[in-house]
Amino acid sequence: MFEPGGLDTAECFFELDSNIVIRLSIDNEVIPIEDLPFEAESLFANVLPHPVYHINKNKMTIAEIVKRQQKRRNSLLGKIQSFFGYEPVPKEYKPYKIEYVENKLKNIEGQKIIDYLHYPDEMENVLLLLENGYVVTEISIAPQGTGDAGLKYFESIDELALNMGDDFIRSMPGSNLL
């Protein structure tokens, strides 16, 4: 149910190479999971490049697009279309270019966990440092519509520090990537 101003929620599970499924708790614990929920889906089912659609080639403002659309509606053709219940999609909203972008999830699957990180004063889940330098975690709750609930990853420890600060605590201080 859509509730304006509500929260999006997500729950992530991690499958280890020994076919053990775990989840990360808010108390920085690893919890083994016996059975995945029925609606659980793999993020790695399709790691092909994904399309990014470019629209509004002329970089018009929303007000300019609305004004142009209103002008089209008031034209003879627009009135005829409206009479028959046809409302065309504004030309400015149609993609003029499709670009395929690398799906970086492919860099996470199959990586070994080499360290566990967490921030001392925050109620955040543990962060997993992977062998290739990526850092992954779960964001359980986020403001609605932001797309932030779910798996969160950083491409490096430097990116993590830049976004969240460098005061994290390492569980395995001898890790060679830090």
Image (tube, helix red, strand yellow):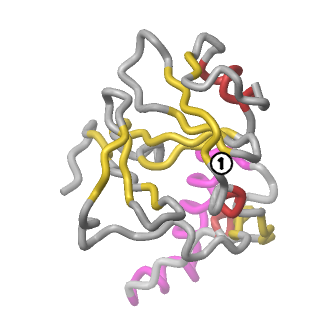
Q: Quadrant of residue 38?
A: bottom left
Q: Is residue 80 magenta?
A: yes
Instruction: Return the residue nearer the eye: 177 or 122.
Output: 177
* Residue 2 in the image: above or below residue 96: above
Query: Residue 101's x, y, as percent?
Result: 77, 63
Q: Is residue 74 magenta?
A: yes
Q: Is residue 15 above or below residue 3?
A: below
Residue nearest the observer in this picture, 115 or 153? 115
At 48% from the left and 84% from the top, the residue drawn is 81
Q: Which residue is mark 1?
A: 64
As rendered, which of 155 and 132 lies closer to the eye? 132
Q: Of 146 and 17, which appears nearest the observer? A: 17
- Label 1 sits on what residue type? Glu
The picture places residue 120, in percent across and down from the top left corner, at 46, 12
Q: Main secondary structure of the magenta part?
A: helix
| Horizontal relation, residue 82 to residue 153: left or right | left
Q: Residue at x 57, y 16 (%)?
A: 168
The boundaries of the magenta stretch are: 60-84
From the viewer's perspective, tell me whether residue 149 is left or right of residue 129.
left
Q: Position of residue 9 (x, y in %)?
A: 31, 46
Q: Is residue 14 left or right of residue 161?
A: left
Q: Quadrant of the C terminus?
A: top right
Residue 18: image x %, image y %? Answer: 48, 64
Q: Residue at x 63, y 62 (%)?
A: 109
Vertical relation: 157 (above or below) 9: above
Q: Residue at x 70, y 70 (%)?
A: 51
Q: Residues within 10 Å of mark 1 (few under 14, many from 20)?
A: few
Q: Secondary structure at mark 1?
A: helix
